[in-house]
Amino acid sequence: MSYQSIGLGTVADDGTGDTLRVGGDKVNDNFVEIYTLLGTGTTLCTGITADATDITFVGASYNVLWDKSDNALEFTDNAKAKFGTGGDLEIYHDASHSYITDGGTGNLKIQGSQVDILGTSETMATFVDDGAVTLYHDNSARFATSSAGGTLTGALIVSSNIEVGASVIFEGATADAYETTLSVTDPTADRTITLPNVTGTVITTGDTGTVNSTILADNSVDSDHYVDGSIDRAHLAADIIDGTKIADDAIDSEHYAADSIDTEHYAPGTVDTTALGADCVTAAKIADDVINSEHYAAGSIDNEHIADDAINSEHYAAASIDNEHLAADCVNGAKIANDAIDSEHYAADSIDEEHLANDCVGSAELKTLSTLLIKNSSGTTLKTCHCAGA
């Protein structure tokens, strides 16, 4: 049955409207239709209960209440609000958690000029139309997107790999126009750079003052790493150069400091005549008692090299003085020992009157049947004696 409208007429009491009985009948029909549809008394229909202020929609397990005093449509735990022909979108609470579930066709879209996700008393995230997306921790912004990329405030802890497409730029402590950019050459194969398990400073090829001995492993620097001419005295430790480090014929007079060569600096027997310059060894360079007969060249000692009164009997080897070593008239009576001269030492006719002492010739000295010529100082024979000898 359709709705029954009561005819009221054009004006009051003009006799054109429904009679009181007809009008009451229509009202009665309309209420019958309502009761038929909704029920009778306080129960409108199965699954719906109502009182003067609230309406309850009773489900098979969970209910929904329109609470007038709360101005709210209230869903009990696990009662779902579903949207879409197939119930694609669900909103409900299960007594522990709240859910918004999109299980149908298409995407779940939340739209607004600014969408904020809030906690009980703080902001968790904001999404601004044509602006930044900002994530918060304890109501403090930590990451925000921008037209250039994004800004992270605080530390980033990564437990796995970070893949960077181009460069990493470090602003530093001061937000200014100067940054440090870490970039890589486009790799042609997989590369790995490993940082050691030590505290220190990463060195670059542009750093000219940070590499020191603590960074270099023992025996890691060899001749390939030295620039020609780069090793000078400042880089050599004391006493490190020995004979094995010096090339043959490499040291000449330009390399010696004055008075620098002493016995500690050459091996025994290593200094010969080829190593000494002409006239380089003076008396001041020779220690006492170090030169013996082995050091003189034959004929090298002449009068110029012997000091006055320097040679005494200790310096002559036995039988080393012969005629060649005696100067003319150097042997006098004081130099001849008693009974040292016999007939072997006289030259023929070498004994004349000057060499005979008075009364020195007796009969024992005369040869048997000898003739004695007695001459004066001028050589004139004064007397000839024929002697029979002793």
Image (cartoon, grey):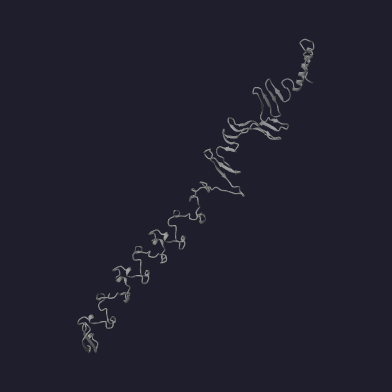
Is residue 263 at least partly visible in the picture? yes
- Residue 33 image position (x, y, % from top left): 77, 20
How many numbered discs sit on the rendered protein?
0
Task: Answer left or right for 196 relative to 239.
Answer: right
Instruction: Please determine whether, in this image, residue 287 is positioned above or below residue 91.
Output: below
Residue situated in front as seen by the camera: 60 or 90 = 90
* Residue at 59 percent of width and 38 percent of height: 150
Instruction: Name the image quarter holding residue 280.
Output: bottom left
The answer to whether residue 160 shows anywhere in this view is no
Residue 10 in the image: state x and y as whole percent: 77, 12
Image position of 315 with respect to 131: above or below:
below
Residue at (39% x, 62% y) in the render: 263
Lateral position of residue 227 relative to residue 267, left or right: right
Q: Is residue 310 above or below residue 103?
A: below
Q: Nearer the viewer, residue 130 or 56?
A: 130
Q: Position of residue 173 (x, y in %)?
A: 52, 39
Residue at the extreme top? 13
